[in-house]
Image (cartoon, helix red, strand yellow):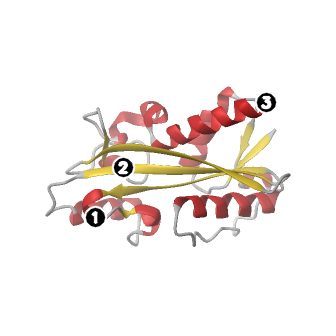
Amino acid sequence: MQLLVASRNPEKIQEIRTAFQVLPITVVSPAEVGVPEEFDVEETGQTFEENAELKARGFSQQSGLLAIADDSGLLVTALNNRPGVHSKRFFPGSDKDRVNEVLRQLETHSDRSAKFVSVIAWYDPQIDRCQFFEGEVTGTIALATEGEAGFGYDPIFVPTGYQDSFGQLGDQVKGLISHRAMAMAKLFIYLQEKK
């Protein structure tokens, strides 16, 4: 069975591909199944669920395949849970620019608590149905960027129970404890029950 990852982010595709190694499912990227490079889905939803479903449905309709999409973000308590659903569009520029903007906005705040949330949408075109699986991990925002691993806000997010950021902990640890890992674990339970 082929499963399309509804994303152009190579790091996210690799994370999902690695997670699915234990199942008899071939994870493919849009490029591998001929989805045109110019095709994209505008994330107009107001929630992680809405955006994940928009992406899963859109890419599935382009390919005819089962599709999985993740929408995730960083919610910082002192910033009224921003950047939240707008994490990728929170501030213009690169991931580094967005990270620096979060650090700048937190300069006057003592509360550095935060959480990462991930919602995975599993879309089956045969039955035109989406299932949702949510995961979250709590933590704090570091005073400065630390580490080179991961992507997005990983260099400033220190998960609860750890001294190091996701950027320092690396893909192996993140793959076990992250918000996406928690959501994937729920998806795997669903798939095993479906057998």
Q: Residue 121 carries which label?
A: none
Indicate left or right for 122 with 140 as reference. right
Q: Which of marks 1 and 3 is nearer the N terminus?
A: 1
Q: Is residue 111 above or below residue 98?
A: above
Q: Which of marks 1 and 3 is in front?
A: 3
- Residue position marked by numbered label 2 in the rendering: 115
Instruction: Answer few, some or many: residues within 10 Å of disc 1's Cα (few below 14, many 20 plus, some between 14 and 19).
Output: some
Q: What's the residue type where badge 1 is placed?
A: Leu
Indicate left or right for 4 with 14 as reference. right
The one nearer the camera, 118 or 102, is: 118
Indicate left or right for 72 with 33 as reference. left
Which percent across, then down, holds residue 154? Answer: 38, 47
Task: Write the residue at 28% across / 33% down.
Answer: 162
Q: What's the residue type where badge 2 is placed?
A: Lys
- Residue position marked by numbered label 3 in the rendering: 195
Q: How far apart are marks 1 and 3 (CA)?
A: 43 Å
Which percent across, then down, holds residue 158? Answer: 30, 42
Q: Which mark is residue 79?
A: 1
**Number of marks drawn:** 3
Which percent across, then down, holds residue 146? Answer: 28, 44
Instruction: Answer few, some or many: residues within 10 Å of disc 3's Cα (few below 14, many 20 plus, some between 14 and 19).
Output: few
Q: In this view, does 175 lie above or below 157?
A: above
Q: Distance between the residues labelled 2 and 3?
A: 33 Å
Viewport quadrant of the N terminus:
top right
Viewport quadrant of the C terminus:
top right
Callout 1 touching callout 2 (CB < 8 Å): no
The one nearer the camera, 192 or 1, is: 192
Task: Write the residue at 75% across / 37% down.
Answer: 26
Image quarter for residue 78? bottom left
Q: Which of marks 2 and 3 is nearer the N terminus?
A: 2
Q: Nearer the viewer, mark 2 or mark 3?
A: 3
Q: What's the residue type where badge 3 is placed?
A: Lys
